[in-house]
Image: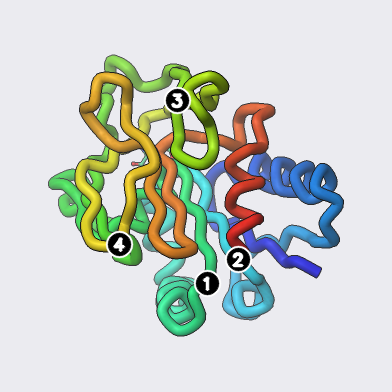
Amino acid sequence: MLRIGILAVQGAVAEHKAAVERTLQMKKLEGEVVLVRDRGALESSDALIIPGGESTTISKLIVKFQLADLIKHRVKAENFPVMGTCAGSILLASKGDEEVKKTGTILLELMDFSVVRNAFGSQRESFEMPLTIKGIAPESQPFPGVFIRAPLIMETRGSCESLGSLPDGTGIIAARQNKLLALVFHPELTGDLRIHEYFIETI
Ligand code: GLN
C-alpha cells in the first residue's frame, strides 16, 4: 500500500490530494494520501509532494516543524521521491536568486539547478501555456501549464536533467534528478493527471 505524503503546512494541498487520489484510482493502485505536518507523518510516507504556495513561509514552517532536515536525510539516505510544484520547486533548488536570498528563504538544496523566483514579474502573474515535457507530454499532446507567480529554473547541472523549456527558450519549466521532480507550474489545477502518474510511477 502506497502512502503519498503531501506537505500540508501552507499552499495548494487539497488540489494535490484530489489529484493523487484520482491517479491512484485510475491506475487501480492501493494507496492513500498522508497530510504531512510532523515528523511521524513524514516518516510513514513513501514519497512527498511539496505544493505551491509561498516559498518563504513554507521554508520557515518546515524548519520550525523539524521537517526540513528529515526530508534532506531521507532523500540522501534512501532516494526518497519528492515532487515540488511552483513554490515547492523553489525549495528543491540548490541555488536561489536575489529575491530568494533577500527574503531569507531556506532552500532544501536537493536538486542541482538555479531558480529565479517570480520570474514573470507582476505584469504576467498568471497565465496558461501548453508545454512539451520529456517523457510526460509530447508536442502533439502538450500539458496545460498553469503559471501563478511562477519561478523559472535557469540552469541544471550534473545529474539534474531539464525535461522542458518555455517555447521561447528563456527558462526551464520542469527538471528531474533521480527520484526528484521539480515543476514551476501547477499540474494539480488541471484535470490532466499525467504528471501525478509519472511521479507515482517513480516511487
Ligand atoms: N511566487 C511564489 C513564491 O515565490 C510561488 C507561487 C506559487 O507557488 N504559485 O513562493
Q: Which residue is mark 3?
A: 131
Label 2 amino acid?
Ala
| Residue 199 visible to the viewer | yes
Q: Residue at x 51, y 41 (%)?
A: 135
Quarter containing the C terminus: bottom right
Circle 1 crowding by C-alpha within 10 Å: few under 14, some 14–19, many from 20: some
- Mark 2 sits on what residue? 47
Kind of residue indicated by mark 3? Leu
Pointer 4 and pointer 3: residues touching (CB < 8 Å)?
Answer: no
What's the CA distance linking mark 4 and mark 1?
16 Å
Q: Is mark 2 within 8 Å of ligand 1?
A: no
Is disc 1 in contact with disc 3, using a CB cutoff of under 8 Å? no
Residue 141 placed where, x, y %? Answer: 56, 22
Q: Circle 1 is placed at which residue position?
A: 80
Which quarter is ligand 1 in? top left
- The answer to whether one can see residue 54 in this image is no
Q: Quadrant of residue 178?
A: bottom left
Q: Quadrant of residue 9?
A: bottom right
Query: Could you tell me if the residues under marks 2 and 1 are in contact, i.e. CB atoms within 8 Å?
Result: yes
**Kind of residue at disc 1:** Phe
Query: How far apart are labels 4 and 2 at the CA level?
Result: 20 Å
Residue 97, given in percent of the width and then of the height, sits at 16, 47
As measured in the structure, the alpha-carbon distance from the residue carrying label 2 to the one carrying label 1 is 6 Å
Eye-nearest disc, 4 or 3: 4
x 40%, y 71%: residue: 63
